[in-house]
Amino acid sequence: MGDWRTVMPESSLGSADASLSSSRPAMSPLGLDIPSSIQCSLLSKHSYNILGAFCTEDNVAQCISYVNQELSSLGFAALCSDSNGKRDLSLVTVLNVMYELLQLHRRGLRSLEDMETEQLKSSSDLDHLHVSNSRLKDQLEQLRRENTALHERERQMQLKIKSLQNCLKNDKEEIQKLQNIIASRATQYNHDMKRKEREYTKLKERLHQLLMDKKDKKLAIEVLNYVGRSDGKRSLWKTGKTEARNEGEMYKTLLSDYECRQKDLMGENAELKKVLQQMKKEMMSILSPKKLNLKEKVEDSLEQALSDNDEEGGDHSREVLELSCEHAREQLTNSIRQQWRRLKNHVEQLDNQASLVQKGAQIDKDVIAREIHEEEMEKLKLEIQQCKDFIKNQQQLWQQQLTCPCDDETAALLHDCYLLEEKERLKEEWDLFDEQRRNFEKERRNFTEAAIRLGNERKVFEDDRATWLKQQFLNITPFADRKRPQTSKSQSALSVSTETELWNGHTPAQLTKSVSHTGGTPKSATSKMPSTVELYRTLRLIPDPSSSRTLPKKGSWQDSNIIHTSEVLNKSRHSTGSDDNSIYSLAGDENTPN
Amino acid sequence: MNFSEVFKHSNQLCKISPDGKYLATCVQYRLVVRDLNTLQILHLYTCLDQIQHVEWSSDSLFILCALYKRGLVQVWSLEQPDWHCKIDEGSAGLVSSRWSPDGRHILNTTEFHLRVTVWSLCTKSVSYIKYPKACQQGIDFTKDGRYMALAERRDCKDYVSVFVCRDWQLLRHFETETQDLAGLEWAPNGCVLAVLDSCLEYKVLLYSLDGRLLSTYSAYEWSLGIKSLVWSHSSQFLAIGSYDEKVRILNHITWKKITEFEHPAVISNSKVVVYKEVEKHPVVGNEDLSFHHTLSMGNSLFSTQSKYEICPLPVQIPVVKPDPDRANPKIGIACMAFSSDNRYLATKNDSMPNNVWIWDMQKLRLFVVLQQVAAVRGFQWDPRRPRLAVCTGSSKVFLWSPAGCVSVQVPVEGNFQVLTLSWHSSGNSLVLLSKEHLCLCYMEEQEDS
């Protein structure tokens, strides 16, 4: 079929050359010798008038045979049947063949299309592959480059390592060298030191010798007369005896020290042993009841054996304890260890049991609790009822007693009761009253005493004032007029203060007043200091006897006052440090030694 | 709390007699003995030169005055004021002088530690001990005064000699396993001698009275080692303070370490109480300027007052970095003291100069930290009660007891900077020394009960 197509354009070119004609027989396998002119005419006489048709009116038979031949060679059914020697062109077969040919043609076209698309696809694939290939190539190149770079770096690193190793080696060598140097220097230094020290000792020796030889006149002791020994004994000659005695004494002191220490240790040991023994006993006492409970247990037999052994051991160890420790130690520790193991087992078991029991118990408990609750409630209700009844009965009885004046006997009894109570109360009050009276009396006595003392003091004061006034008068000053009110003021202040002294400072208002007075006086007389100082002096004259008399009653405020004045006037260095102190104490368990 | 008058003194020389009755003070070349109750001058002795050292004899009958510059020792008697004794060491020189425990012999160390001379006041005899070692504490007597241990150096090796004080007979002489012996100290029971190596090595050796080596203890190697060592009064504990800012406690049975007390820069344990001294400058308002008030304020007007506050935890403690280029770096535990009842241990770390640490020895843990405003100059326990007195070179005395903490201003005219303090043996009074003055501080009597 392809041939035909290729033929068509060539023939259309219109060149009726030999090549075409020669090609034609080659293409037709049967080698039909159709003259080219016919063919040409056939072609030209075709419906496509340009080249002439293949089949014309004239060569139908030839055409038929030719087609027939062609078709049969191609494997189609023959167009005409050669029945009875005559060729009949059967239309049906023609059409069939035509149809088949058309089909073939269409199929051919379709496959062509497919092939074309396939080719397109594959070409695009190819392109894609080309691109990816190139890309991969690039990548490969890059990686290769990187690889070489890394290689290079590694090489450099290696070089560096090598150099560093060299350095290290050098340094090590250096260190070794330095160490050697140091060591040698140290030995040299030690040697020199020793030499120098020897020289030095030699020098010392020489110097000593010289000092001794020179018979140093200056080297002497001058004592007025000799002093007796502190122990009052005479000194002894140094002999072998004293040496031996010294040795003996030394050993004695050492021995006593060791004895002391041993005693301490013994005491400590005994204490520890006691503790151990007690612990053991307690352990045994804890463990023994358990044995009975756990009789059913499987390990019980084993434990029984153990405990038996222990009990023996316990008795045994008690005796052994008195013996030396070495023998006792092993037994004791062993038995303790056993006990401890058992205790541990026991505790573990208990733990297990407890966990088991707890689960069970929780359920049981709820049930029991409810029951108990109800029972208890019932009981309580009953009790309440009883109580109520009881109260009611009592009330009734009371009312009965109140309403009807009962028999005289009971009434008298009751009356007596009341009277007794009253009497007792009265007695108490009487006692109280008595005590108060006594207090009053005491106070009155105090008061009278105080008044007498006050009188005395006033008298003394008056005398003093008189003398002072006399003095003032004698050396008259221009400020005499002003001073008089001051003195009177101070007097009043002082009198108040003495009163407060007597009353143990029971009048705080007055006290503050007095203080303000004394504070005020220097202010008013700041310009004339000597007079105030004098005033102070006079003021001090009076408290002196009074204070000596009232010494035991000194109040704290007065104390401080005196110190103030003494500071002012004497600048004494004796002072309470209370102003400067600031005490911090911790009220915690940590700081208090327990 | 009361304070006495102020007396002069020189060179911080002021000693209470062992019987607690007298107070000896030195003023230049004069020795003044006072009755401690009345503070009246009982005796006044004049020495040949400025006094550099004073010491009472154990029976409080004699006083030794050393004049190192002149190489002289003068001894005075309290019973016979006209009795005198003068010891001249001559050209050998004198660097240290002390009484023997019997109070009848004087031990003089000559210059260059050439020898120790033992002078007897009873027989005028003199004996020499050669080869004494030049170290911090080369001589130590047992508490009962029967034995004396002396560090010696011969042939570049350290030795210890134990003498019987009664007749100065050599009892034991043994070599110690030390590089460079730095000190020795008897346990209070007089049966164990602790010997420590130089600070380059951490090493403590414990010898029995008969010269047997009982134990050796070393906590670490190479870095600077022991800075201080102290026995508890019961001889039960040996506290070792070292340059690594730790205190290690050894027991007396196995001589092994019981515990280690670190001095952390941050205190966060809630069981520790930190008392911080807080200074407040008195604010004077116009209304305060009344006559009496100003007079009573007096001296304290311009000085600062201070009180203690309890710091909330955690507390950061200021740390002074020591200079690494200097010898004897200011770091490590240099001061330690057990309280009289052995219940507490007070320590001071040199790199935390403002703090005193008090440790509970029953619970073996830190108990209290006192943080002062100024660097702590010294502290001493009351010989009778658990009470610690601290001074910081300020005009205050600080007292700690388990009940609390007090700061007391010394009510003295002028500036009285307390540099050192010492308790009276009864624990009822305290001698406070400033640079040139001293004053007595009397505790309240109620506290006795």
Image (cartoon, grey):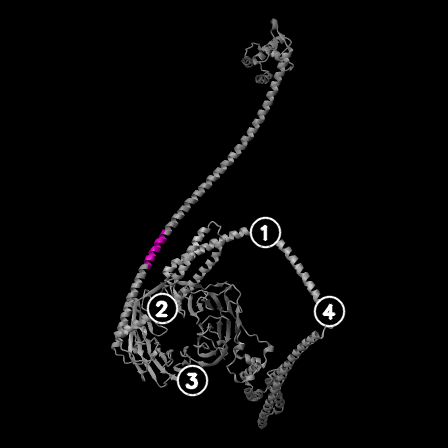
Give the residue type that dot 2 points to: Glu
Badge 4 is on which residue? A400
Residue under the point 27% across and 77% down:
A237
Of badges 4 and 1, the one in the foreground is 4
A551, above or below B175, in the image:
below
Badge 1 is on which residue? A364
In the rendered image, the quadrant that contains the N terminus of chain A is top right
Gap in angstroms between the C-alphas marked 2 and 4: 90 Å
- Part of the protein shown in magenta: A169-182
Is residue B6 shown left or right of residue A191? Answer: right
- Is residue A175 one of those drawn in magenta? yes
Q: Secondary structure at mark 4?
A: helix
Badge 3 is on which residue? B41
Q: Position of residue A269 (x, y in %)?
A: 40, 64
Q: Chain of mark 3?
A: B
Badge 2 is on which residue? A259
Q: Quadrant of residue A383?
A: bottom right
> Magenta part mainly helix, strand or loop?
helix
